[in-house]
Each structure stands twice: as structure tokens, then as C-alpha cells.
Image (cartoon, rainbow, N blue to C red):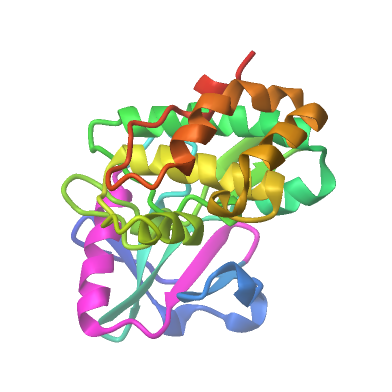
Amino acid sequence: MEQIRGGIMKKIDITSINFDKVVKINDDISSESTIYHDNKMVYKIYKNFSIYELIEREAHVEEASKITNLRVATPLAKLYNGYSFCGCTMAYKKGITLSEYEKTHSIEELKDKLIDVSLELEEIHRNRKKIVLGDINYNNVMIDEENNDFSFIDFDGVGIKRMEPMTISAPLFEYLENRGIDYQGKQNYDRLAYLLAFYQTVFHKSIDEVSEDEFEMKTDELPFLNRSRYDFKVLKKKNKTVKDMPYFHEVFSK
């Protein structure tokens, strides 16, 4: 497959991809793109993007490609259809998504894995490029159980430098909307989204639908939830601003 140097990143024309030799990934994974892989590389082709959204996404892809030494699937090359930018490639990360991991492991095992992932999220936030993931959800973390490793994926639309994330998670969007709060591309919102995702997993509904009595009953089943009692009460409030939230591992590590 021909790879053409274009600025900092390589360019690949999608006509050079043999789609008979790649595997299409389930459309449920992403609504914004069609994704293929060949066990070495992931090919992500955007769909239903306006020209302005493609210009913005290309800028995100270029900045994200410069990130190194973190457990993330950074963009490696830009995909073009003729002269038009239309997607990117990333290294293929084997394993299962954190969403799939959740279905086959106990909540205690999930909690321990989330602590490990949260520690890496803190490392990502320490990067000098001021990275904000935005779309924190269990489909965007790949777990490689064979090698006891994991990676954040879907890294092509993250907030970086002064650019805000292009997407945020549904639970975070709902939480902010219920309080009349506009999203801000800050790392605190990543920490908030991480906690919201966990509570949604534990209670099978949004945190706004969980009563304090339900929380108390669940602590009998899952005693480690007692460590998050204060944060749960803070999250339940209908404040007009987002309080400074802790990292998941700061709450649940022993």
C-alpha cells in the first residue's frame, strides 16, 4: 500500500486499501465512522461530516499524532479520498473493550481494572499538550488480558492544546443538560465522566435517577462504594457549576 508524505503525517489514498482483505468492525462501536482493521492497522473513515467538521477533525488528528509514551492509539496516517481528507489510521489494539470486559467479570474485578485505567488517565492529563479525552466511555478502552495491558482508543477527536474534544459521552451530556451547564473542555469533565460511567454500570441508570436509599442498599452489596459516599452526594446536587472531581483511583484505591 502506497504511503505518501504530506507535511508531518503520512497520507494514504483509500483507493489503495484492499477492502476484501480487511475486517469491518461492528457499526455499534461508532456512529461517526466506518472502521476496518487488518490485525495490524485500523482504518477509520468518517461519515456524515460537513466540510467544516472534516477540517476541524484533521487538525485534531494532526495534533493527536504527536503524542507518544502513553497508552493511547494515536493516529498514524491520514486517509484521503482524492484530495479530500476523510479519515485516519491507528495501530490495531487486540483484546476486548472495557464494555465487553464488564459483562464477563465481577464488579470488583471491574473496579480494580478501572483503577488501573484511571491512573493512566491521570498520566494523560499530565501531558504538556493539556489533553482532554471528552468521550469517556467503556467502548473507548481496549483491554488486552493476555498481556495484562490496555489502551485508550478513539483518540482522533480528543481535546488538545486549545482545541476542545469533538465528542463527549452520553451520560456526561445528560448530566450537564439536566443542570443547565455548558460543556467546557477541561480535564475535570473527564474525571466527572469517568465517575458517571461507573455509577451507571453499578445502578444500570443515570446517577440522577438513583436515590440515596438505593445507594445505601447497594453499599451492603458492594462495601467499597462507601468510599464514594461524599462524591455521590456532591454529584447528586443540581449545582450550576461542576465541582472539582477526584480521579476514580483517588476514590476507590485501597
**Residue 49 at what x, y percent from top left?**
33, 81
Which of the pair 217/193 is nearer the observer?
Answer: 217
Outermost residue, top side? 254
Task: Name the residue located 59 percent from the left edge and 54 percent from the top edge.
Answer: 209
Determine which quarter of the picture holds residue 251: top right
Q: Is residue 241 left or right of residue 77?
A: left
Relative side of 133 to 110, left or right: left
Horizontal side, residue 244 vs residue 214: left or right: left
| Residue 51 is a magenta residue | yes
Question: Residue 22, can we see it?
Answer: no
The number of numbered badges drawn on the structure is 0
Q: Which residues are magenta?
A: 38-66
Residue toward you, 191 or 71: 191
**Magenta-span inclusion, residue 163:** no
Residue 246 in the image: x percent, y percent?
43, 27
Question: Which residue sits at x=75%, y=23%?
Answer: 223
Q: Which residue is pictured at 47% across the width and 49% down the height?
A: 73
In the displayed structure, would residue 125 be above or below residue 176? Answer: above
Front-lying residue, 134 or 157: 134
Which x, y percent locates residue 100? 74, 53
